[in-house]
Image: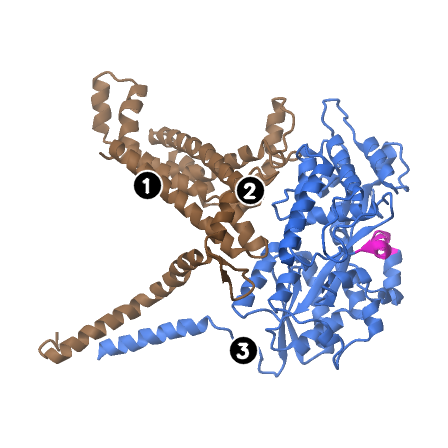
Amino acid sequence: MRNNIMKILSVLLIIGLINACGKGEKENSSGKVEITFWHGMMASSVPALNDLIKKFEELHPHIKVSAQTIPNGDAGIQKIMTSLQSKTTPDVSWIYADYMEDLVLSDAIYPMDEFINGENGITKEDLEDIYQSLRTYASWKGTLYSLPMEATNLALIYNKDMFKAAGLDPEKPPKTWDELYEFSKKLTLDKNKDGNFEQVGFFVPVFPSSGSRNGWMVWQFRPFIWQAGGEIIEADQSKVIFDSKEAVSALSLWQKLFKEQKLSTFTSDFDMAFVSKQLAMAMDGPWSLPRYKDLMKNLNWAFAPLPAGPAKQATIVGGEYLAIFKQSKHPQEAWEFIKWIISPEAQAQWAMSSGYLPIRRAVAKIPEFQKYLSENPNYKVFVDQMEVGQAERSIDYGGMQITRYLGEAIEHVTLGDGDPKAELNKSAAKSNKLLKEHKK
Amino acid sequence: MLFTKNKKYNSIIGKGEALSAIGFLSPTLIIFGTFILFPVIFSFYLSFQKWNSFSWSGSFIGLENYIRMFQSEEFWLVLKNTAIYTIGTVPLNMIISLLVAYGLNKKLAGKKFLRTLFFAPVVVSPVAAALIWRWLYDPNFGLVNYTLGIFGVSPINWLNDPNAAMFALIGMGVWKTFGYNMVLFAAGLNAIPDSYYEAATLDGAGAWSKFWHITIPLLSPTTFFILVMSMIGSFQVFDIVYILTSGGPLGSTKVLVFYVYEYAFKFNGEMGYASAISYFLFAILFILTMAQIKFLKTKVLG
């Protein structure tokens, strides 16, 4: 008898264990709908995000948003991949354009049109108020699959005191490529004449192309291609064109700056170098502003727009994009959340508390935000730059590999002894082979 | 005991015992099956498939993954890097750990403390350790360059120079693992009877000839075990590469497991190709270990 009882108990125990691994019910007793929201926000921005969510919940008492931090970049997408397989996706999540193709092809996320044109939708004017560059980036093959939550772009940070010391006007940051090169030269100093530079003019962000910062490097290189008048890929996606003479001139500039300033023996933590007065200029985004207030309080620094290239002035626009997963049990509530996040009021609150840029022009009409702009001139540089901001022309197929190939070219001409034209040709040939194979 | 008289009932108990045995074993069986057995078999199956992990279905492509691997230029570079890393770390690691273990085998004040100190890197999380080493190797702010600077060596960008990065990696790899081998060597040294040394002393042997003629030969089973395990470990190195160099610069530190990771999780989930490489790695390790056993067995244990 005892044996049988033990048998039954052990079986029950196992069943219990298996059941415990299952998913709990999401509806809680108060009748509220709970939606999960995954994001890769930096820890310093999480309090601001919580405030934003609290405001949303006040306005929408029947919805509860449970926000969870997931790792940024590669590790984040792995988490999303796993959740897709185990049917535990969030309702709403940050997604990355590089993986849009996979998410769409595996039917994981909703096209946004279903909600935008639905009963609880938004107007065409509302949609078009969002910067075109962001909408492009949120789409795959011309269809919106996500909506931006915030915008960023890239500007130039420089140390005014170093400008003064080098005989440059601290109120006149470089406006062209030529000035960027010329100023960098003047700001690169070998003070004790030992052959090594104690101060470097301009930081060129070069990282291993096989590493997690490759995308980051290529992202910062893209505006230089545009400034020269080039593009990454043909509009019809038939082939990449980053081997054009415009792109070659952009890479040559990077190579010249990198090699002449001996950046191969310079730290890759440019902000530390900037703070410790070893660096005069670098590229950086608005996400750094809250941190710099403290970190750089002993420095005399400012932001300025990126210098214009031979063709035009340009910067790269980025952002975080929200998508709704098809596994969601509450897509309508998830949409309600996104719809509110992109509203001018929420955008103004979010921009001022997080330091990100608003995703739409209407925010600038809010008086509170106007006041904020006049008090924060460095932040204003970024907002103004949105007008010349360009989105990456999305690469519909093989975006990850093509970004890698371009990164390899940058790595080979800076850390190695490659020639810009030859390396870009090599990378473009590899990319085009990939695109052709995909077309088959 | 109570029921053994009844034959019929007895057989029922036999069945019941088997059932309860399965019941008690099942937690282990389920965990082993799900997390060890299933992945091993499934990845073998995957190595003949083209499968992106976003979808449920893959397609059978035969040996294409393996053929592609052998034709890839990058694959051979990666294999070469892995071999360099192994050749760089394993002997260095063994020499250092043997010397430290030998030194600490003597009567010495603070022996236990030193042993703990040398063993500490083994226990430290590899990611945390690699982050610290990234700082040590920083060209501007790092302690390594600072120390070298005192001796007039101009700054080296350890992690961004294709000629230096592998050395940086080997340096950290040795630091991270020699403590473990040190403990094994220490155990081996303790197992050598003192009487051998006494006899040698009576015969007038010096410290060096005692080390060479007694310690080394009697330690060889331990040495052999450490050699095999270290080679397996260094062929599978990943975490410190991932944090320290990410396989760069110019692919100079890209090793096999990092290459697997890239294809499995970065390039839109090429699970099939990644599985094929994994099985190739398994084959290399299997052959290497077998060869080592065959060649050394006669010498060491025979």
Residue of label 2? B74
Residue lying farthest left? Answer: B5
Name the side, left or right, on which B14 lies relative to B263. Answer: left
Q: Which chain is blue?
A: A
Q: Is residue B178 above or below residue A212?
A: above
Amino acid identity at mark 3: Glu
Q: Quadrant of the C terminus of chain A?
A: bottom right
Q: Which chain is brown?
A: B
Highlighted range, magenta: A375-390
Residue lying farthest front? Answer: A440
For the residue pair B89 and B254, the one nearer the viewer reads as B254
Residue of label 3? A25
Subunit bearing disc 3: A
Q: Residue B183, percent across and down?
A: 36, 38
Q: Residue A231, percent across and down?
A: 78, 50
Which dot marks residue B290?
1
Marks 2/1: CA–CA distance: 27 Å
